[in-house]
Image (spheres, helix red, strand yellow):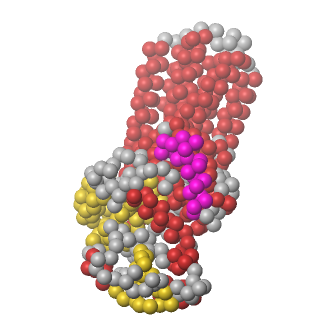
Amino acid sequence: MIALARYVLARCLVSQRWVPPIVLFALTVGVFSSAGGDAIGTGSIAALILFPATTWITISALHVDDISQITVVGVSHGSMVRARIATLLTSFGCSCSLAVLSVGSVIATDPAHGAAGGVGRTLTGLLLINGLSALSGVALGQACARPLIPRAGLSWTLAVGVTIGLIAIPKSPLILVLAALSGAGQTAPWSEALPPAGFLVVGDLLLLGLTLWAYRRRSP
Amino acid sequence: MSHEPVLTAVGLGKRLGRRDVFSAVDLEVRPGQVVGISGGNGSGKSTLMRVLSGTASATAGVLRTTTAPKAIVPERFVPPDHLTPLSYLVHMGRLRGQRRGQTEPRALALLDELGVANARSSMLDELSKGNAQKVAIAQAFLSPVSLCFLDEPNTGLDDDTTVVVNAMIERAVASGTAIILTEHELTRTIRPDVQYRLQDARLTEVTPERASSTGAALITLRPSDRTSWDRLRAVAATVSLHRDEDVHDDDVSFTVEAGRVDDFLRTALDDGWSVRAVGPVPPTGGRR
């Protein structure tokens, strides 16, 4: 698992496919942090941008190798599905690293340093928002990548379309859950935020499970 | 060495659309066994290899394989870009649970043996097709594996390298690795223990009688002052050679696959050998 994560990271780093999503995310965090607003508000916007950034990173990681090399890695790793899961976990890990930097940044630039709603509450809210955003990004990236969507152009078009739908439509499940968690990160009771967050986690895991099953059936 | 099968396929089939790529494939592979699968272009050899290696699913039948480490050389290897052969091999070794300290010397030795040591710091995507194929082969033999799938491993390789690859296969087999290899015609590879032909979606075993009737010739040569072994060895990739003490002190007999006899004789005559006899192989010949 660690060896495969190291390999995927090395491949993504040298191919420089990580640059656009991470620059996009860093710019967003930088711009909104510089305004010096409250941590949970700024952090929620950064977490929203983490979703397309993670989708981008995931598709890049899954597309970085040719099918023949994916075969070599899959057989060497013991199973194509296990190798795929390891790649997805690597993407999730990268997103979580970005999230930690983002959370640190918004708390540092908040004049109250997240103390307005309580530091623990703010921190928990931000970590949950970012974690959910990263998980949804990985699930969407997996669903849009090869071989489920065999053409790269279609992969990106579908990913961009779904991403815009999920972050631009005010009543989309992702927005509703992030808004609920954002409220809970300030003063609202957790009991209102956690059930929809749980539904989103279950939905993401279902999507991952279904797409991995389909990957097993359609693997190269 | 365990004698439990490392791969068992029962009634395996693969259907793409309305076409059966193969059906009712029964196969059992044991440790240290070499299984050869030949067939024409588009006969389904690579699809069968993908199914056997677990990288594609079968549409019928049951496949059981060992959980021990496995390796594959795919039919068309497109090397990852922006990586050197050495760094690539180190990553592949780590994937199979080896440490960098173990993998790096082994990788360097394999690159040297395959004749790509001088390209070890070049980028993989800058290598020629043959050299990229050598790196693909090197990754398969990096560490001991239970089962190795070689899908047309000699594609793009010159005769000298074919000899080296055959020697690598021999060493792997001696250490208990089972090999499943495909080629259009199994004339440049080591002689398999069991040979199959995939034709019309059916995998049929090529019986020893049929193999010998289509197969090898026994060629006896006498060397001269200017004879060279190197080129002859390169051409004679599938040859078992032995001195025939009964005939003449210097005479050397070679067993050569049918498809390579002309090349072999031409090379031998060019290099100053004298042809003493050409005939069928007696039935008591060596395994390979």
Residue B80 position in % (x across, y down): 59, 54
Q: Is residue B288 magenta?
A: no
Q: Is residue A217 above or below residue A26?
A: below
| Residue positioned 42% across, 70% down in the render | B190
Numbered label tally: 0
| Residue positioned 66% across, 47% down in the render | A14
- Quadrant where the C terminus of chain B is found in the figure: bottom left
Q: Main secondary structure of the magenta part?
A: helix
Q: Is residue A199 visible?
A: yes
Q: Is residue B167 above or below residue A21?
A: below
Residue A106 position in % (x across, y down): 68, 21
Q: Is residue B102 magenta?
A: yes
Q: Is residue A161 visible?
A: no
Q: Is residue B209 above or below residue B83?
A: below
Q: Nearer the viewer, residue B288 or B193?
A: B288
| Residue positioned 27% across, 51% down in the render | B4
- Left or right of residue A52, residue A78 in this image: left
Q: Nearer the viewer, residue B27 or B232?
A: B232
Q: Which residues are magenta?
A: B93-114
Residue B55 position in % (x across, y down): 41, 54
Q: Nearer the viewer, residue B122 or A64?
A: B122
Q: Is residue B281 above or below residue A199?
A: below
Q: Of all residues shown, which one is farthest toward the right? A: A34
Residue B223 position in % (x across, y down): 52, 85
Q: Nearer the viewer, residue B273 or A178?
A: B273
